[in-house]
Structures are given as structure tokens and as C-alpha cells.
Image (spheres, grey):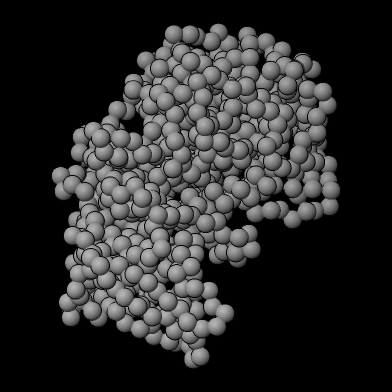
Amino acid sequence: MPGATELSPSRSQYCSRINNRNEGSTEALFESCCFVGDHDPLELRSLRRSGPGKTPAVQRARQAFWEQPIIAEQGMVSDSLFDGNSVTLCDLLKTRARDPGSRCLRIDLGKGCEVVVLAFDPKNLEFSPDVWLTASPVPYQEKALPLSERAAAPANAPVYYRQAKRRKPEMRECEVAVYGGTPAGVTAAIEAARMGRKTLLLSFNCHVGGMSSGGLTATDLGKQESIGGLALDFYRRLGRNTDFSPSAAETLYRTMLDEVGVTVLLDRCLESVEMQDNRIVSALFETGETIKGAMFIDATYEGDLLAAANVSYRVGREPRSAFGETLAGQWQTVSWKDVYQFCCLPISPYVLADDASSGLLPEISADKPGAPGEGDYRVQAYNLRMHLSDNEGRIPFPKPAGYNPARYALLARFLNFDPGIEWTLNYTTRPMTDGPVQMRNGDSNNAGSFSSDLVDGSHRWPDGAFEPVSFSALPPPRRGLTMPLRELYQLREEIFQNHVRYQQGLLYFLANDPQVPQALQDRVRRFGLDPNEFKETGHWPHQLYVREGRRMVSDYIVTQDHCESKRTADDSVGLASYPMDSHFCQRVVVVENGRATVRNEGGFGHGCPKPYPISYRAIVPKAEEGANLLVPVCLSASHVAYGSIRMEPVFMILGQSAGAAAAIAIDKGIAVQQVDPKELKRRLLAVGQKL
């Protein structure tokens, strides 16, 4: 063969016939093999399959490799490619890797088909059962389980959505219907009930408390003096305002609801809304129940009720030109420069380092980013706020079903790129430091360039629609549902399970994969899941941290100017004070110093000089769109300002104010837009709110 290097006897062992396991099956032969080039990638020039009526092996190899990984077990590789036969790869793994940094080996099957070994330990030539193979140039792709398989998942697996069984149709009447079991939903329901209104709280899942009971207990407080009312009461009764138990938080929320007689309905998924002019008449749920109320409060993280009621909203990021915000749009330069950017190292984004033809590594977007300042429809990344422990009895990170270390190839390359990187297992902004994750007793968050946030994984969560486009002029708001709610819930369940698999696999990878430096791996393995939390879901959180969903568009929009006290609302319903904070929205290829590398985009953390008031007009829709609806979570704010508002204490504050406003509107027989701000202020101050 022209250009081929003669095989040494010791290396000719790999050129072996496929072992036929099934009697009567056809056989395939490696006809000619050789090492070529300076890096000695193993190249199998042709692969022939005999037998009548069989698809040519090269075509079948290409299809199988591109559609799914091949799992290597016990020194052999088995896959439908060989119809039950196996071929050993033990000797193949002993060849030198083309890219030692990522321990990547290319095996070319000819005609554009090649296998890339993404995970093996070159120091240990024994075959590892955890070796996975994927195809180049097509990278690893996450695949959603069919609904039938998801339904058969273990009873203790975290889930977002299970379709409710239809019951006999039933009408329930109330004065205030609160949809969303979030902290805002809890306080809204409590305040309305305290003001004498018959109140229902309907939670999408079987819990109340949202993220406060779903894992986020390292509370984003901002200025503590800005917290009052029921939020302050909650933390005082809990005994602390941070690092508390999620299960204890849920127990206290239920107690507070019971004390004022709020009826709580769990596992209620909204199906549709009946409107009459600009008022919600009733809401139908998948259980068959119809809820009729005088006032409705959307306290969901996503804004499903407001969308079903045809209220205007936005998803994604406004361009910088929309409100003159310095943090707006893509590639802002005010905050977080070089933070969690792979230590600014020239890490190649490609499967084969510096070879664009080999395709992108997993978890890097192929979509083209926009220009500085342009807006888009991307949503900041979500994650699970897991609770960890280093105490005796902790639960080792389990190997999730379908685990594939190839998904973490970019992290593996980063971990081995420069021995000078300091791995902190915590937040860090210092040069040449990274998490890559936070590991502590209790709530453990994203803390690195490639961490527990699933960057680019949440864009379709809010309303099901996403286009990878950028724009310099602000598009008009959206109205209505982009798909039936049940279809949206099913889509979210797929996204939810993708997040669960990603994060479970990430922790297992860090604790067990030989590509992780031993010193770091030993530190990771000192932690495990807290056995005292999330017992019903395998000790993994039941709640996905939806940092941002829809944002209502009303007559008043909170912007960066409000956060920086350059503009002040005169109809305050609560204070916010946490820094303007956004997690990454995309991970893309950029060119720096003439070389392609990978960078994260969309993150910022920019302080507010002092607590600032949030306008009542920002939590009510336009009068022509919703006369009896209040929205304390998906309120009217820009992406930048929402990054400061979106904290659980603020949601509790705004929820209580929404509940009070709903009660006043019922008393007066008026629309929510007509509530007198002075009367509302008197009520809120009387119950301890800070305005």
C-alpha cells in the first residue's frame, strides 16, 4: 500500500479475524491495515463483509458509528454493526494517541468513516470496561428516551412531568387562585388568605417551595436589610436564612399554608384557560378540574399561566440598543472578563485537536454567535442544586444509565491541558483557577468553565420555541402558546432528563474516570450525595433550577437603570439588591491569536449600589391583556434586570405583595391595574414589607 509503514510483528496482532459468536453468521475481514503519519493513527483501509443480501460493512459501520456509541466491555466490542459478533480492541488501545492531552485515538475505516476512542488510560494498557467509542466528524449527541421507556424508569428517579389521570370533571370555586408552588406562590397564597380571601394554591408537581425546597439553600440574599414580611418570617422560623435543609423548608412552607387555611392541590398541570374579554374566567387542569376565581396569580418559574392567557412576553436577551444597558446583548465587556473561560488557554474545540474536519467536541454549540451587543433567544443555563456531604454514610456518586464519558471530552482535555491550573472545587475568579464544580456540605452549585450548568441546554424550556439567530433591533413580544401545554410539558421532561443525565454523569466522571487527575479525583470522592435529602428521588433534587423563563412585557419594564438606582419606581412592592447575575448562555468556537478555541458567553455578575424598589406596574399585565392576573415571578423586566430580581427572597417578597393586591382588587371590585398604590403600600408596611 503506497505510503504505508511496515507493521512490526508486535503490532500485527490487531489484524485479526472477527470472532464469530453466532453459528451460521457471516464473517467480516480486515483486509489491509497499516500505521501512517508521524502520530501512528491506526488506519483500517477497508472492511469487507461477505454473505448474500448483506449491507456492505463500510456503509453499515458508518451508519452505526454515526448514530450511536459502541460500548466496549471485557476486552471486546459488541454492537449491531457485527450482528452479534465481536472484535477485540485491546491492542488498538495500545497504539499511541494522536492527541495525548485528550487521550484520543483515531481509527479510520475508509470512505470517510472513522472511529475515535475518546476515553482510555494510556498508562494502563489493560482494557477498561468504561471505554466508549464515537464517530468523527459527528460528535456525541444526547438522545431523549422514548416516553414508554421514561415511564418505566425507577420510581425514585427525578422527573419533571407525569401526565395526570383524568378524573370526573369537577368545578372548584375560589376568590384567589395561585398557580405555581414556588416561594412566590406560597407567600401570595398566605397573604391573600390572611386578608380573608378563599385561596387555592395549585402546584405543578408534588412539592411546594420551588427551589427553596428543591436544593437552592445557599440563599442569594443580597442586602439582608432589604428583606421583610413573610420572607423574613420564613427565615426566622427556619432558624437561618442560608444553608438550611430543603426538606425542612418544605415542611415549614406547608405549616405556614395550613395555619391560614390555604387549600393546596398538588400535581396540578394547567391545560387551558377560558378568557372573557381581558379577564381569566377559569383554568382547566389535566386532572379534569376547572378552577374558577376572581383573581389569578401566575407564580410559576416559566410563566405558563400568563402565556395561556395571551399576555405579552419575551424569551432571551434584548439587544444593547433596546434599553441602553451596558450588560445587554452578547459579548458584554463590563463584567466577568476571563471568568470561567477555560483559564484563557488555547484549548482546541475539535475532536482531534486543531483538526476542524474531525468535528466539535460534545457540549460546544455549532450555531454561529452574534456580534457584540446583539440580542438573541438564548436562555441562561440551568442545573440541579445538589446537596452533598463528606460525612460518613454519604452516598457515592452512582453511575447513571446510559453513561458515556465521551460527553465530557472537553472537560477531560481541560483537566489535562496545563498542570499549573489550580482546581478549587469552589467559586473562583483568580487567574489559572477553576472549580470545575462546587463541592461542599449542602447546596453545591455550578463553579467552573465546564461545570454543572448545562450550557445551551435550556433554550426551548420556557415556551418550546427557539431559533439560533441574533438581532440588533428588539423584536415584538410574543403572545399565546407556541404549542399545546401537554406537548410543552413533554418537551420539558426530555430537557429535564437531559440535565439529570448530564449532571449525574459529570459527577460520576469526576469521581471515577482515569482521565481525571488522581489528586482531583481523590478530593471529589471525599464527597457524595446527602442521604438525608431528596429521599424520594434517589437523593437527587426533584426541581430543575429554571433561572429564567418567560418575562412578561407590561407597561413598565425594570431595566439596568433601576438596578443601578438611575431610575426609581414610585409604586414599590418590594426591594431587590442582589447583583445583576446571568449564567452562560452559549459555548462557542472563537478565534484567538489565530487559533480556534472554545469560550463561554453570556455570564455576568455586576453589583447594585443599594437596594432598589420594584414597581407594582411590573407585576401586572397591560390593562387590555389581563385585568385579574398578577405575575410576581415572570415579571416585566429586561434580561439584565431579571438577573438581579430572580432570587428566592425577592420572589417571596413580590408574591406577598401580589397576594395583597389581589385581595384589595376583590374588595374594591376593580382590575389589578386600578389598585391604589398608596393603599397597597399601607397594607404592605403593616405586615412588615420593606419598600
| Residue 106: x %, y % from top left | 31, 62
| Residue 325: x %, y % from top left | 44, 16
Question: Residue most toward the left?
Answer: 420
Residues 670 and 160: in front is 160
| Residue 408: x %, y % from top left | 36, 54
Q: Where is 270 relative to 405, above or below?
A: above
Image point 52% across, 32% down: which residue? 469
For the N terminus, which image quadrant? bottom left
**Residue 321 left/right relative to 283:** left
Image point 35% across, 77% down: which residue? 30
Question: Residue most toward the front?
Answer: 2
Residues 35 and 623: in front is 35
Answer yes or no: is residue 35 visible. no
Residues 461 and 28: in front is 28
Quadrant of the image occupied by residue 217: top left
Q: Where is 49 relative to 191, above or below?
A: below
Residues 660 and 139: in front is 139
**Residue 363 left/right relative to 460:** left
Image point 30% across, 40% down: which residue? 597
Answer yes or no: is residue 118 visible. yes
Quadrant of the image occupied by residue 16: bottom left
| Residue 293: x %, y % from top left | 78, 31
Q: Where is 17 relative to 209, above or below?
A: below
